[in-house]
Image (tube, grey):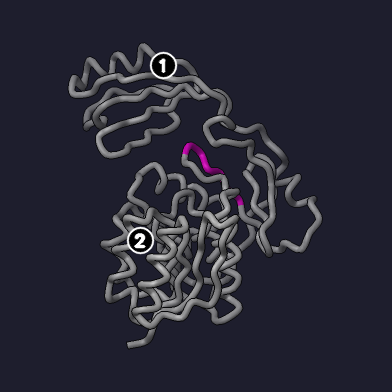
Amino acid sequence: MSDARAPRVKPDVRCPYEDLFIYYLQGRVGPGAPALEGLIGNWEEEETTFLFFSAPAGEQVQRLLAAQPHLRLVDHYEMRYDQWQGDSLEPFAVGRFRISPPWKQASAAAANGSADLDLVLDPGLVFGTGTHPTTHDCLAALETAWDRRTPRNVLDLGTGTGLLAIAAARLGAHRVLALDLNLLAVHTAARNIALNRLERQVLAVQARAEDFIHVPADLVIANIHFDVMRHLIEAPAFLAGRDFILSGLLRSEARHVETRLLQAGARIHRIWAHEGTWYTFCGRTAVN
C-alpha cells in the first residue's frame, strides 16, 4: 500500500537563509579538512567548489587553504538568498499540487484553489524553487501520466531538489528512485523527502543517470541537460516499453529528441512548449 501521507502543517517560521557568503575555490575539498563553522552547503562542480556560509568566513577559508594547498581561492561574493535563487519563495499551485517552503506552510494551507496534494519544498542552495516552466510542465505531465495508468515504480533522473520524485510519490507511486550526480542536490532531495514524510517510498542517491537507466521502472522522468538525455534515449532499457516524461529541452534539442523517439516507435501523448522555448514530452516507448 502507498504511504503518501501529507506533510504536517506547521506555523510560519522564519526563512533559515538570508545573507549568503560564498567562497569560490579551484579544486575540491579533500579528506581531513578542518571543520568549517557556519557552513551551510558545499557545491562541487567538476574541479570547482563553492562554499556557502551564513556569516563572513574569510578566516576559516584561509585555514582550509593552508591545510589543503591544492585549493585556490578564486573569488568571494555576498548576496541575499532570493538573489541566489532568482526570486523569493512563495507558495504556488500547479494542477493538483500545492508547493510551499516549510516556513510558509500555514499560508499555503489557507490558500484557496483546486490543489489537494501538498508538497513541502526547501530548495536550500540548489537551483530550483519549482517555478521554472519545465518544472511546471513536468508536474502537469505527471498528472497526465497518472490519468493514463498508475506507475508503481518511478525513476527520476537529475532529481535536483527532489520535487518531481516527491510529486510522483504523492500521486501514489510505491517506489521512486531519485538520482543526481551533484551530492549537494542529493542531500537537499533527501531533506525534502523527509519533510514530506516519504522516506518509505522515495530514495535519493548520488549517481550518473546513464548508469541507472536500466533499473526497472514503469515511468522515467528526466528533466536534465540535453547532453545527458541524448544518451539516455538511446539506451535499450529506456526504449523497452516505458512511460516517460522528458524535459529541460530547448527547441532544437526538442526536435532531436522527438525525431529519435518517433524513429524508435515511441508514442508521444502530449508536448508542452512554453513560449516556443522550453519543451516537455510525455509518452511511452514501444514494447519490444
Q: CA distance from mark 2 to mark 1?
A: 38 Å
Q: Magenta span has 122?
A: yes
The C terminus lies in quadrant: bottom left
Tell me the quarter of the picture where residue 25 sits. top left
Of the numbered discs 2 and 1, the one sitting upstream in the chain is: 1
Q: Magenta span has 223?
A: no
Which label number is shown at residue 229? 2
The x and y percentages for residue 232 are 32, 65
Which span is picked out in magenta? 120-125
| Residue type of the residue flagged with mark 2 | Met
Q: Is residue 25 left or right of residue 120?
A: left
The foreground one among 111 and 266 is: 266
Which label number is shown at residue 285? none
Q: Is residue 65 left or right of residue 287?
A: left
Residue situated furthest top in the rendering:
59
Q: Would you call the spot at circle 1 few (<14 residues within 10 Å), some (14-19), or many (20 or more)? A: some
Q: Secondary structure at mark 2?
A: helix
Q: Secondary structure at mark 1?
A: loop
| Residue type of the residue flagged with mark 1 | Ala
Marks 2 and 1 in Cβ contact (< 8 Å):
no
Question: What is the number of callouts on the image?
Answer: 2
Q: Is residue 21 visible?
A: yes
Look at the picture and state if 40 lies above or below 137: above
The foreground one among 68 and 194 is: 68
Magenta highlight: main SS: loop
Look at the picture and state if 288 lies above or below 61: below
